[in-house]
Image (cartoon, helix red, strand yellow):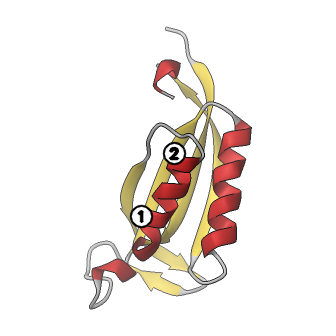
Amino acid sequence: MTLHIAEKVVIVTEKIIAKGVCKIIDECGATGYTIIPAGGKGSRNIRSTTDRASVVDDFSNIQIEIIVKNTEMAEAIMDKVRARYFKNYSGITYLEDIKILRPEKF
């Protein structure tokens, strides 16, 4: 088995901006992403994944994971999401070095 180096961008933010974030991901050339419900505690209070986060589901948090081939694409996604959304919405983003089995998928 041969593993290949790739980058994983992780974005944790509010569900209400998911469509816009995913549009940025697509525009940057990523081939896909995974969206997962997210909860926890941060500077803007506690968000739960088991209880209803609020009256409006769009106020819940999500985690978006994107696997890309190179650091340049990863940083472009992170920078565009930060510039467009993180002044008005809660969110963090980070980058992980990973190894993948099927590089042609990305």
Left/right placement of residue 95 relative to residue 18 reads right
Farthest residue, direction top: 1
For residue 97, which quarter of the picture? Answer: top right
Q: Position of residue 55 (x, y in %)?
A: 27, 91
Checking the image for residue 88, the label placed there is none
Farthest residue, direction front: 27
Neighbor class of circle 2 (other Cα within 10 Å; few <14, some 14-19, many 20+) is many
Q: Position of residue 70 (x, y in %)?
A: 68, 33
Q: CA distance from mark 1 to mark 2?
A: 14 Å
Left/right placement of residue 41 relative to residue 85 reads left
Q: Amino acid at mark 1?
A: Lys
Q: Position of residue 18 (x, y in %)?
A: 43, 66
Along the line of sight, which residue is nearer the eye, 50 or 57? 57
Checking the image for residue 66, the label placed there is 2
For residue 8, which quarter of the picture? Answer: top right
Q: Which residue is mark 1?
A: 19
Q: Amino acid at mark 2?
A: Ile
Q: Residue at x 29, y 80 (%)?
A: 57
Q: Residue at x 38, y 82 (%)?
A: 59
Along the line of sight, which residue is nearer the eye, 25 or 40? 25
Query: Is 35 drawn above or below residue 96 in the view shown?
Result: below
Question: In the image, which is nearer the foreground, mark 1 or mark 2?
Answer: 1
Left/right placement of residue 95 relative to residue 33 reads right
Along the line of sight, which residue is nearer the eye, 34 or 52? 34
Q: Earlier in the sequence, mark 1 or mark 2?
A: 1
Q: Secondary structure at mark 2?
A: strand
Neighbor class of circle 1 (other Cα within 10 Å; few <14, some 14-19, many 20+) is few
Farthest residue, direction bottom: 55
The answer to whether residue 101 is visible is no
